[in-house]
Image (tube, rainbow, N blue to C red):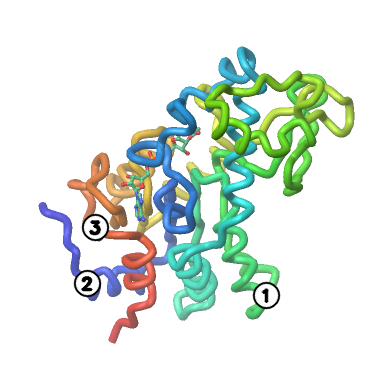
Amino acid sequence: MVPSSDYRQFSKVLSKAKHIIVVAGAGLSAASGIPTFRGAGGLWRKYNAMTLATPQAFKRDPSLVWQFYHYRRETALKVKPNAAHRALAEFSLSSIRSLHAPNSTFTLITQNVDGLSIIALDDVLSSNPPEPEEQPRILEMHGRLFDVKCSSKTCGYVQFDRSSPICEGLRGVEELVDKNAMDPDIAKTELPRCSKCNALARPGVVWFEEMPLYLNVIDKLVDKADLCLVVGTSSTVYPAAGYAETVSQNGGQVAVFNLDRSDGDEDADFLFLGPGEETVPKALRLKTD
Ligand code: OAD
């Protein structure tokens, strides 16, 4: 069956759903100015961003990998949540306060590491303080850009650190490259260090070949979900790419929001093509009769 793009019909499904999950990807933050991984935004300097997001790349060239994450950190520090982040944050609170609460759940499962969904939710919560039991949930399954993690297996200390730059060795490095077109080689001693044991630190994100976070919790939520919104992801990276299919197989409904066609969207119940910063607020804020 061809997916529907009827907002009113979607709104009816939304108002009946009790256990909603959102599976988000880089497209959610694109309008905020964070480049996506695939497509036009996927190049950093001359590198495919995905070749740097691996433990091997960090082992081989920690200087280059840190420069890449320094660039992503600095970009994320400059930007703000967009209308899609805000709509999801507002909806998460209103959905757990709605008539079909208290047993309803809403969880945003994001592959993004930029923290923008958390900032958007904090903004909403600051003017609508929640009761302890109604705290909406965001699971950052690929970690957080602003976590700095000790690379020593015996230590593994993680510190949340939004300082800019993350260390003096990385200060101004991006501007330097524009002029020289060469990658600066920063000594390991000048890269971020663990504040506990002084070993080399690494970005606290999940790389390819590493295990995403919260998998047990997520699996339970996916099994229980009766509605899955897939927002701004190419749906090519597992396990996130498989969640919509599981919800569908369990009898739930799936709505995809993407600028373009994405993997598996032909099997969705709803498909809203266009910028998520327009389609998501439109779909979530529409009142049903
Ligand atoms: P991708 O870069 O693979 O996909 C981004 C998706 O967002 C694409 O399908 C675009 O069409 C869509 N898109 C772009 N702009 C949009 C907009 N304004 N509104 C709606 N959609 C838009 O990013 P992800 O699917 O998040 O993992 O990639 C998944 C994972 O692969 C990432 O978390 C990262 C990456 O490599 C790791 O680093 C482990």
Q: Nearer the viewer, mark 2 or mark 1?
A: 1
Q: Residues within 10 Å of mark 1 (few under 14, many from 20)?
A: few
Residue that appears at 53% across and 62% down: 81
Q: Horizontal and vertical percent for residue 171? A: 73, 38
Tell which circle, 2 or 3, labels the residue nearer the N-terminal end.
2
Which quadrant of the figure contains the C terminus?
bottom left
Tell which circle, 2 or 1, labels the residue nearer the N-terminal end.
2
Residue under circle 2?
Answer: 9
**Tag of residue 49:** none
Q: In this orientation, does residue 259 appear?
A: yes
Residue that appears at 43% across and 64% down: 84
Quarter location, residue 7: bottom left
What's the distance in space between the residues labelled 2 and 3, CA to CA?
Answer: 16 Å
User: Relative to 117, is 18 on the left or the right?
Assistant: left
Element class at badge 2: helix
What's the distance in space between the residues labelled 3 and 1, CA to CA?
Answer: 32 Å
Residue that appears at 51% across and 72% down: 90
Q: Disc 1 marks which amino acid?
A: Ser
Give whichever of 17, 192 is nearer the camera: 192
Q: Disc 2 marks which amino acid?
A: Gln
Residue under circle 3?
Answer: 273
- State ligand 1's quadrant: top left
Q: Disc 3 marks which amino acid?
A: Leu
Disc 1 Cβ-to-ligand 1 distance below 8 Å = no
Tell which circle, 3 or 1, labels the residue nearer the N-terminal end.
1
Residue that appears at 37% across and 51% down: 232
User: Relative to 148, is 286 on the left or the right?
Assistant: left
What's the distance in space between the residues labelled 2 and 1, CA to CA?
Answer: 32 Å
Q: Nearer the viewer, mark 2 or mark 3?
A: 3
Residue under circle 1?
Answer: 126
